[in-house]
Every structure is written in C-alpha cells, then in structure tokens.
Amino acid sequence: MPAVLIVLGAVLFALAGVLLFIGVRHFKEKGFLFNDAFLFASREERQALNKKPYYRQSAIVFFFLSAMFFVLGLTFLVHNYKLGLLEIPLIAGALLFTVLSSLRINKQEKK
C-alpha cells in the first residue's frame, strides 16, 4: 500500500473526526454557529434570532459531511473504489436535507 494513500486516509479520518466533533457541539448548542442565516445576519438580527433550529440543521449537515469523509478515507485505505459510490447518497442526502430544512425553518419563522 503506498504511503500516500495511508497519509490521505489518515487526513480524511481526522477531518471526519473534526466534523463529527463540531456536529456534536452543535447538537448541544455550544460553540460558534456555522450557518449562513447566522453568518449573514446583522448584529441586531443575531441577537433576536432563534438559534435552536439552525444549530440542529448545522449539526445534521456536519454529521453528513463527517460520514462522507469517513467513507472517502475508508475507500482509499481498503482500495475498494466501489465503496466510494456511497458518497453519492450521502451528498444527495446532505443537499436535500439542507434545502428542505431551510424551507421548513423559514416557514416556521413567518408564522
């Protein structure tokens, strides 16, 4: 096994671990909120914003990303590139969840 693939796998596993850590912190509603609704809001809007649904949304997206990088690292380490096909449903799931949950959050805020 080439050393480059081992290093690449280790880096991808580390990235998956960092994303998992951020996801867990977001579920606990701790730490900086990595969400575009929060990042692009003015200071006054940030104060009045109900952050709970945005923390939840970000946490689930970080879990999707963590799983994607874990599968990608596993693909490089075991040399089974068909395993990389699992990336497709994970990416599609993350995109679909992000769009649908954003629509749901906006609908709830307008009520």
Image: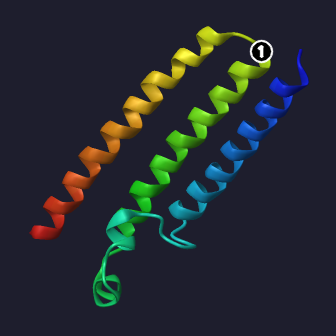
User: Where is residue 26 shown, x and y percent of the image?
Assistant: 53, 63
Left or right placement of residue 1 versus residue 72 in this view? right
Looking at the image, which is closer to me, 29 or 37? Answer: 37
Which quarter of the figure has residue 110? bottom left
Name the amino acid type tagged 1. Answer: Val
Q: Residue at x 75, y 45 (%)?
A: 14
Left or right placement of residue 46 versus residue 60 in this view? left
Q: Which residue is drawn at 63% across and 27% down?
A: 71
Left or right placement of residue 61 versus residue 69 in this view? left
Looking at the image, which is closer to me, 86 or 25? Answer: 86
Of the 4 image quadrants, the one containing the C terminus is: bottom left
In the image, residue 24 above or below residue 109 = above
Looking at the image, which is closer to me, 53 or 74? Answer: 74
User: Where is residue 107 shown, x and y percent of the image?
Assistant: 14, 60
User: Where is residue 52 shown, x and y percent of the image?
Assistant: 38, 69
**Residue to which mark 1 is pinned:** 78
Which quarter of the figure has residue 5? top right
Looking at the image, which is closer to me, 109 or 6? Answer: 6
In the image, residue 39 above or below residue 18 = below
Q: Residue at x 62, y 35 (%)?
A: 69
Of the 4 image quadrants, the one containing the N terminus is: top right
Left or right placement of residue 95 versus residue 99 in this view? right
Q: How crowded is mark 1: few (under 14 residues within 10 Å), some or many (20 or more)?
A: few
Q: Which residue is drawn at 39% across and 55% down?
A: 57
User: Where is residue 91 shown, x and y percent of the image?
Assistant: 44, 32
Most extreme residue toward the left is: 111
